[in-house]
Amino acid sequence: MTAAIPRIVIGGTWSGCGKTTVARGLMAAFSARGLAVQPFKVGPDFIDPTHHTAICGRTSRNLDPFMMGDGEVASVFARASEGADIAIIEGVMGLFDGVDGGGIASTAQVAELLSAPVILVVEPKGMSGSVHAVIRGYSTHRPGTAPAGIIFNRVGSPRHRALIEAGLTARALGWIPRREELALGSRHLGLVMASEVQPGTSPAGIFAECCDLDAILDLARAAPPLPLPEAAAPATRREGAARIGVARDAAFCFTYQENLDRLARAGAELVSVSPLSDPLPDVDGLYLPGGYPELHAAALSGSRFLRELRDACGDGMPVYGECGGLIALSGSLSTGEGEFPMAGVLPARAALTGKVQALGYVEARATGTGSFLPPGLAYRGHEFHYSLVECSRDARFSLTLSRGKGIRDGQDGLTEGNTLGTYTHAYFTDGFASAFVRAAGEYGRT
């Protein structure tokens, strides 16, 4: 069976050309028309999807062929798009930028996998006629993903637009002026989170005025039907299942929805908790995702949650923390404002630095050393952090990386008891989720 899913991909010439601005603007404009918009983000990014979700009221999903595999990209897309009037997929970096300079996990690859038309975002700063050479290059480099239209972003003036239009050969679908209110703030890991954007700053009006929304919608509706995936198994409670807490607040906010869905399909009952304001709930296991513990170090350090977490880890409760979660499980965190005690579960100290310490995809394999993950279990993910973790001399690691830096020399998964902390942001496999739920269920029964 197939399904007609109207869809477009928002690609860019390079990072910083305004893909997020345009994606947010189109999502807002179509939502304001009353359409159900399903958002997606190419690549491993956690932040852009928060903006998509806030605008569309539907959870934005990541589409990453390297981490997920081609088949799951198509399955996740089709399942999430059910009931949507249009799917808008924000790309990553430049249109053709992928793993190791090739096309794997590029925006172009996702567009090809989903047979989705590409709208190219072009920022013509410092150019008029020369911009056509840029567009021609993107149109001929890989004919299968030649842009179906162009949106010009941060056009300097009406005169600037007129100079570009004089030699235009591509289809222009939008001319976005340079407007301060369209810009989003940023920090060391990227844009600010959606929860930090001031209310009443929707870009819907500007994009409705400056883009041909009818033409864009027609383009999306012209995309060919896609095969429907097999229905995902419903989440059911079964033997070995457990209550798993998921930290979700301003300090722990980097989660893939698919990871949560996998835990639920493995039988887990998920319980949201804010380490900044809540006590540790009555759970059998805990997932501490990444985020910004460094921005909330003082509040986190004095929290009841960390005190109770230390006791629960000592009691053997399975706890999985990644990046920000790894830091919270360490002995302390040093920032520019001082050194703050953390949970003290893992034999390590963390420190925020002024530069990127690791950035890229990860391929991990469990060694079976002191972890709930079975030996040989393999999965993929990514790492991006400005912190360093200094481990004690006798620290034990439960993961070896064939790709990525990890905590130390290609080792990741610092472990103590039934607690596991990694720098890798994992994209869960079914095996990963099942192992976590199984361990939590065994703990709960004892």
Image: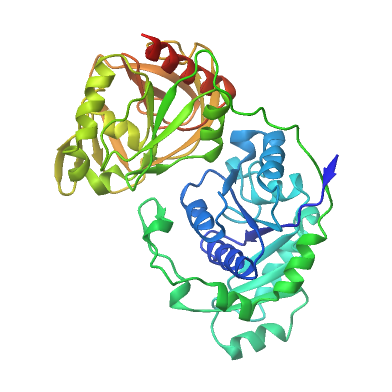
Residue 92 can be seen, yes or no:
yes
> Does residue 331 appear anywhere in the picture?
no
**Point 23% across, 24% down: residue:** 310
Which quadrant of the rendered structure holds the N terminus?
Answer: top right
Of 136 and 24, nearer the camera is 24
Task: Tell me what residue is drawn at x 64 percent, y 60 percent.
Answer: 10
- The quadrant in which residue 152 appears is bottom right
Which of 333 and 13 lies nearest the eye of the viewer?
333
Q: How is the image coloured?
A: rainbow
Residue that sits furthest to the top in the current view: 446
> In the displayed structure, does residue 3 sit left or right of residue 271?
right
The location of residue 245, given as percent across then percent down, is 39, 30
Horizontal relation, residue 190 to residue 278: left or right: right
Q: Residue at the spot x=74%, y=79% of the render?
A: 168
Extreme residue toward the left, this view:
338
**What residue is rendered at 50% in x and 13% in y?**
240
204 above or below 377? below
Report x, y in % for residue 52: 54, 56
* Quarter location, residue 349: top left
User: Horizontal placement of 229 versus 409: left or right?
Assistant: right
Position of the C terminus by quadrant: top left
> Residue 378: x percent and y percent?
55, 20
Name the foreground residue: 7 vs 249: 249
Which of 249/444 is in front?
444
Please give the count of numbered marks on the rendered protein: 0
Percent from the top left, x then y, of residue 119?
Answer: 69, 64
Residue positioned most to the bottom: 159
Q: Is residue 155 shown above or below 10?
A: below
